Image (tube, rainbow, N blue to C red):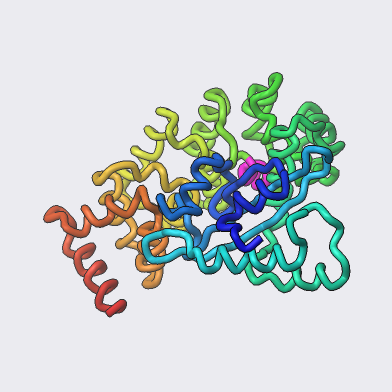
Amino acid sequence: MSTISSISALLALSDSQFRIYELGRKIDKLSKETFNKIEQCQVPYPTPTQGHAHLAIVFWQKKSVQPYLWFIKLPLDERGLLNQGARDHFIAIIVEALGSDLSVDPTEKQAELLKSNPYLFTPSQYKLAMLNSLLSVELKKAASPHYQTFLHYISNNNWQNWQDVGVQGITDFASRVNENDNASQIAKILAHLPFEVLSPLCGALENCLLPVELIEAIISLLKQAEESELDKKQMLMRSLASSTQHPFVDQYFSQLLLSQSLNADCMVTISARCWQVINGQERAMQFLEHLVQQQEGELFPAIFKDLVAIPTIRPLLFQCMRSTERSDTLAKAIGQLFNTQS
């Protein structure tokens, strides 16, 4: 057991099938090849959150249909590489508690060892629900009974009668948005949904690649939203998070960054969920110039620190820092950022 050098090796030793998901910013499946490179520190973690990798590892024995779940939070170094000491410590605790058979029912003593594992965390309710829905699709299992409740709700035209709609039903729908006529149906009624339904729906859709008709409906609603409907605009923007490479979405954010002003909430949503729209130096500069105009003093350093940790964004921000085209206000803000760090 002392030769176990990675989480992948531990899972392979236990004869487990497994899937790995990133849980920090949104839910994204990581290929085993990518995860192996992350574990070997060959590539930085793609979407760090507050200096950590947030992972869901789903595994099951070939002889069993019951999957097991680990939610792991591992620190990253300043380059975004996995802290291997923390990873090895996590493995040591698991091995001490369970040995090589990860599927055994732990004894009371083993359960205590597992609970004391400092690298485990509990995701939010909506992420748990969404992950459960994505897994049911991935493993070709049936949706929960709440799925039919939501389908009935969106076909009933009684939008205010949402009290029986459950989060699990919404996430089941989002994970199946490309099935049957789900996308067409939700696109037609999106404008009628009360915020109590629209908000969790958008939070679920942010993890899904959306079909074009739904993208068009969301962008149309965004353009129609009043300035006072900040919460609604935020949620609608979030729903596009996994579809940022679609030309319609890219065009929408391009126009948004060219606008005269962006509020702080929109800036936070872009950096936390839709960071992939910052796909070149020009976009990065536009974003930073909007950001530096915000009146909230701590917002610029907080978002800059968050974005510079993302491997695809870091070089763009460094280019902006060296650019002679940056405004005096931006240059001053960057200078203050590094003065504070020193």
Q: What segment carries the magenta color? A: 198-204
Screen quadrant of the C terminus: bottom left
Residue drawn at x 67%, y 64% is 121
How far from the left and from the top, in percent, is residue 238?
53, 45
How far from the left and from the top, in percent, is residue 136?
75, 36
Q: Is residue 80 magenta?
A: no
How far from the left and from the top, in percent, is residue 29?
58, 41
Residue drawn at x 42%, y 61% is 306
Q: In this view of the protein, can residue 242 be seen by the observer? A: yes
Is 310 in front, or is 30?
A: 30
Q: In this view of the protein, can residue 269 be seen by the observer? A: no
Residue drawn at x 52%, y 24% is 212
Task: Judge from the rendering whether residue 331 lies leftward or rightward of residue 105; answer left or right.
Answer: left
User: Looking at the image, is 67 positioned above or below residue 53?
Assistant: above
Is 108 in front, or is 303?
A: 108
Q: Quadrant of residue 124?
A: bottom right
Task: Judge from the rendering whether residue 61 lies leftward or rightward of residue 74; answer left or right.
Answer: right
Which residue is at the far top? 180
Residue drawn at x 48%, y 51% is 38
Screen quadrant of the N terminus: bottom right
Is 188 in front, or is 291?
A: 291
Q: Main secondary structure of the magenta part?
A: helix
